[in-house]
């Protein structure tokens, strides 16, 4: 099979998996605050 | 980088750890950041921290400790959810073996009496207390002095460290002091610093004796617990909850405590003593005498209110105040358009250059199509809005850090009262202009559950920064860039109108919810007015940087993956015959889904392309823009990265040859986005904060219905009036 087709299949499967994982994480209570910190206030940086 | 989950990591049994406590807006989180190297949000209004956070601090090369940052609280008697977190934590220390090694009580040196109230409660806990005497820069600027040694002796604190988190001095001394206390803790005084005598002593003695006997408390802790539990019903509830959870008392024993408490309250009442103010009377009485000693402290007029008060006379004036506020808002939204043009054009050119580079240098094929049409087209369409979002966050941070936001809350309190809320709801609502999620979390500072619930339900109507790309895309595409009445920029004015529409509707709905939500509500609005401060550029820059980073991360993760999935749905199935590209897209998977919902949304002026955007943007509102970009890029294959704004303007109906979209559709779609609940993360946080599915489902239902009806009225009404 053409390399480009294989690459697209892999990327699309990964993307679908990531979207599903994100939805599940949003509704897992322990992750909600972590998500909101990440996307909204970015309180999590540590200077090294 | 510290993962967010680390901030709520549990403290293990063998960890060395310290806890930071203090009044709201005393600079606690700024000290936490300096101890741990983290960058938690700090600002100039009470209630920025609403949950516990854990970080790590290194004290020399051989000692690493955990640092717990708690929400600001005025005392161990909770008035709101965030204060309850503090009370519950303190009760864990009292009845659990795992106490912090040291408590750092952060005190605003310009307001000693009020701040030391909480400190005095901490001193009862048999844990060394170091007082971080913050904001000493302001005391010094006024050439006033505090006798640190004398104050330490009188309070019985382990140490007092004068410091300024703003000017970043005193932190090293604080670290040294923490280390000394961890290695050689100063023993606490076993007796209360004030005397409870006469009939109050007689009435409270049985309860204090029970605490001493049942929980092996020192007399000091036993008496302070007795005072607190008699004074505050919620504190007694937490006591019962903790003692039951830790199996420290049988149900019968708890019942005995309940009966004893009731008897004491009745007895105090018969003596004409108000149980609720008992603890405050004793503690403030002691602190007042202590601080009134002129030899130890020179504190009179430390906080010269004249400058802030003079400014407040104008900024919170009943007439001029709201006008100035509206003027500031107009300036901000106008600036979003005018200042962002140049950087937006630069980013747009960069995105096109990347697309052209790939088109020129990559061999033709499906992967190239995915990269150009899906990834560069979809993500690039979102990236150009970064400057506008940064400008919005910059101004909102300035308003917060200067102390003006608290004035807005105060100023609007009289109007908020009319809609069943208080000025306290105003700060979370204003936070919602940046993002609904921290706004919803900030509602924890609201004392009444009913008011908190109403604020949560209306907060997503405040136009967040994720709506900004949708608004500005449509405004740039369809609203003429011209000035009306000689000074009103029409594009900026349209943007202001969208924000105004969301805000006014939110307040009107608060009235409706107040009538229909049958919950008890008894709260008053007492908010500390922080002094005006020149915003620290470091803090402002950090906020803007964090927001920009979060936006880019979001674009790099969820928006890119959504664009890839959508590209797949738009690209496939491949046409068997020589259909033109538009017909192929209409028959793609995404096109079929869009066409399926088209009959429902066509009365609003939306076609299947907008329909697909409405569906995908439930992940995040800005995905609407990347969705349209992906569709147009697949449609215009081989022509380079397409400008969505231009594509929307030039899109024509193949049957009629007329423009597919016009100003009426743009306004209808913007109105839809003002009201629609297009945000999965908001849904999740409302479920978390209300601890139920009922309220987030209700929120989605009412917001979607409102969005649909409003768009319907705008579009159909506009058509009746002859617009297109």
Image: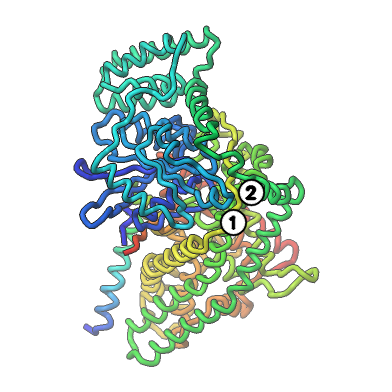
**Res. B410 mark:** none
Are dots 1 and 2 in contact, CB under 8 Å? yes
Q: Is residue B657 above or below residue B214?
A: below
Q: Name the secondary structure under disc 1.
A: helix
Disc 1 to disc 2, how far (Cα)?
10 Å
Question: On the image, numbered disc 1 is attached to which residue?
Answer: B399
Residue B483, position as x, y percentages in the image: 74, 72
Q: Quadrant of residue B121?
A: top left
Q: Is residue B291 above or below residue B577?
A: above
Q: Earlier in the sequence, mark 1 or mark 2?
A: 1
Q: Residue at x 22, y 45 (%)?
A: B15
Colour theme: rainbow
**Left or right of B347 in this view: B153:** left
Q: Chain of mark 2?
A: B
Q: Name the secondary structure under disc 2.
A: helix
Q: Quadrant of the C terminus of chain B?
A: bottom right
**Left or right of B321 in this view: B197:** left
Residue B4, position as x, y percentages in the image: 33, 55
Q: Residue at x 27, y 80 (%)?
A: A5
Question: On the image, numbered disc 2 is attached to which residue?
Answer: B408
- Of residues B134 and B361, the one drawn nearer to the viewer in this rendering: B134
């Amino acid at each position: 099979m053409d390399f480009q087709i294989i690459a697209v299949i892999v990327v699309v499967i990964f993307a679908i998996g990531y979207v599903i994982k994100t939805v599940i994480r949003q509704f897992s209570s322990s992750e909600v605050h972590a998500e909101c910190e990440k996307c909204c206030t970015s309180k999590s940086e540590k200077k090294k | 980088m510290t993962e967010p989950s680390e901030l709520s990591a549990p403290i293990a049994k063998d960890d060395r750890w310290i806890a930071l406590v203090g009044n709201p807006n005393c600079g606690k989180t700024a000290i936490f950041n300096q101890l741990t190297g983290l960058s938690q949000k700090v600002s100039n209004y009470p209630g920025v921290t609403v949950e516990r956070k854990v970080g790590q601090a290194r004290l020399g090369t051989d000692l690493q400790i955990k640092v717990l940052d708690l929400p600001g609280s005025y005392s161990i008697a909770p008035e709101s959810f965030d204060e309850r977190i503090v009370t519950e934590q303190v009760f864990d220390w009292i009845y659990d073996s795992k106490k912090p090694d040291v408590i750092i009580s952060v005190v605003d040196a310009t307001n000693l009496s009020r701040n030391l109230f909480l400190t005095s409660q901490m001193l009862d806990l048999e844990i060394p207390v170091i007082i971080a005497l913050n904001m000493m820069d302001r005391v010094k600027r006024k050439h006033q002095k505090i006798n640190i040694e004398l104050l330490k002796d009188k309070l019985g604190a382990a140490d007092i460290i004068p410091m300024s988190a703003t000017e970043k001095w005193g932190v090293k001394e604080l670290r040294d002091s923490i280390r000394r206390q961890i290695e050689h803790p100063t023993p606490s005084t076993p007796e209360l610093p004030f005397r409870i005598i006469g009939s109050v002593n007689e009435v409270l003695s049985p309860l204090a004796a029970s605490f001493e006997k049942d929980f092996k408390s020192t007399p000091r802790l036993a008496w302070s617990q007795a005072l607190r539990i008699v004074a505050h019903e919620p504190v007694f509830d937490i006591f019962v909850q903790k003692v039951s959870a830790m199996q420290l008392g049988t149900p019968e024993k708890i019942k005995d405590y309940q009966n004893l408490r009731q008897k004491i309250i009745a007895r105090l009442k018969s003596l004409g003593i108000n149980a609720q103010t008992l603890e405050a009377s004793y503690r403030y009485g002691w602190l007042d005498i202590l601080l009134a000693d002129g030899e130890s402290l020179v504190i009179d007029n430390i906080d010269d209110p004249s400058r802030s008060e003079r400014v407040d006379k104008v900024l919170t004036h009943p007439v001029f105040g709201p006008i100035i506020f509206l003027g500031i808002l107009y300036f901000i939204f106008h600036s979003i358009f005018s200042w962002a043009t140049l950087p937006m054009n630069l980013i747009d050119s960069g995105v096109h250059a990347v697309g052209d580079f790939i088109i020129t240098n990559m061999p033709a094929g499906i992967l190239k199509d995915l990269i150009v049409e899906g990834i560069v087209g979809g993500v690039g369409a979102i990236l150009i809005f970064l400057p506008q979002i940064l400008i919005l966050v910059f101004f909102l941070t300035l308003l917060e850090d200067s102390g003006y936001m608290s004035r807005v809350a105060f100023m609007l309190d009289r109007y908020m009262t009319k809609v069943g809320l208080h000025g306290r709801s105003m700060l979370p609502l204003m936070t919602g202009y940046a993002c609904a999620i921290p706004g919803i979390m900030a509602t924890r500072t609201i004392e009444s559950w009913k008011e908190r619930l109403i604020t949560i339900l209306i907060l997503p109507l405040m136009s967040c920064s994720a709506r900004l790309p949708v608004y500005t895309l449509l405004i740039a595409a369809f609203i003429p860039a011209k000035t009306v009445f000689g000074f009103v920029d029409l594009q900026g004015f349209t943007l202001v109108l969208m924000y105004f529409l969301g805000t006014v509707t939110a307040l009107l709905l608060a009235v409706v919810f107040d009538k229909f939500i049958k919950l008890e509500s008894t709260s008053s609005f007492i908010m500390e007015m922080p002094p005006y401060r020149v915003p620290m550029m470091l803090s402002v820059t950090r906020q803007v940087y964090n927001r920009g980073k979060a936006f880019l991360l979001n674009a790099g993760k969820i928006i890119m993956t959504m664009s890839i999935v959508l590209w797949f749905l738009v690209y496939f199935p491949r046409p068997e015959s020589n259909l033109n590209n538009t017909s192929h897209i209409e028959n793609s998977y995404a096109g079929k889904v869009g066409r399926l919902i088209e009959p429902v949304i066509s009365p609003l002026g939306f076609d299947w392309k907008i329909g697909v955007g409405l569906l995908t943007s439930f992940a995040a509102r800005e995905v609407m823009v990347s969705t349209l970009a992906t569709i147009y890029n697949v449609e215009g294959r081989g022509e380079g990265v397409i400008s969505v704004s231009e594509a929307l303007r030039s899109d024509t109906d193949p049957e009629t040859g007329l423009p597919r979209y016009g100003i009426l559709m743009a306004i209808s779609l913007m109105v839809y986005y003002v009201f629609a609940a297009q945000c999965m993360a908001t849904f999740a946080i409302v479920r978390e904060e209300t601890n139920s599915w009922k309220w987030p489902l209700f929120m989605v239902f009412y917001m979607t219905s409102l969005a649909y009806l409003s768009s319907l009225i705008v579009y159909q009404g506009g058509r009746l009036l002859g617009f297109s």
